[in-house]
Amino acid sequence: MILRLLLNNPKYSDIEILCEDEKKLHGGKAILAARSKVFDRLLYNEMKESYEKQISFPIFCNGNYIEYTYTGSIKEDSLTKNNIFETFMLQIFFNYRTFRNLS
């Protein structure tokens, strides 16, 4: 999928998501908002985050979730017993019905 090229790519991003471990993820507001009602409300409802280039959103820093946001799938081998619960809790938080496509 072509969107995989945009995944965490600083060149094409218009927002940085700051994680609790000082890690930064690069994203596109339009993609995040189109895929998640939470991001849509956060980034396009005249909240302060609508005007900022960085937002602090530690819960989003699960690599599986950002991959799913951009590609619609998660590589099955990236789900482990250590991250599978967090990954599925994120899909509930961000209003996805299910992770349907494991590749």
Image (cartoon, helix red, strand yellow):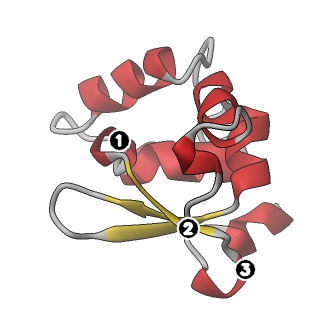
The residue tagged with tag 3: helix, strand or loop? helix
| Residue on which the image places disc 1 | 79
Residue located at (58% from left, 26% from top): 38
Q: Tell me the quarter of the picture where residue 25 sits.
A: bottom left
Label 1, label 3: how far apart the Cα atoms are:
27 Å
Would residue 68 be found to the left or right of residue 45 on screen?
left
Asked whether residue 74 appears in the rendered view, the answer is no
Indicate the quadrant where residue 12 lies: bottom right
Residue occupied by mark 2: 53
| Quadrant into which the N terminus falls | bottom right
Q: Residue 12: which disc? A: 3
The residue nearer to you, when weighing 13 against 89, is: 13
State the SS at label 1: loop
Residue at mark 2 to residue at mark 1: CA–CA distance: 30 Å
Mark 1 / mark 3, whichever is N-terminal: 3
Q: Position of residue 76 (x, y in %)?
A: 47, 43
Q: Nearer the viewer, mark 2 or mark 1?
A: 2
Of 53 and 5, the residue lying toward us: 53
Circle 3 residues within 10 Å: few <14, some 14–19, many ≥20: few
**Residue 68 image label:** none
Identity, as a three-letter code, of the amino acid under mark 1: Leu
The answer to the question of whether label 2 and label 3 lie on touching residues, with beta carbons closer than 8 A, is no
- The answer to which of marks 2 and 3 sits earlier in the sequence is 3
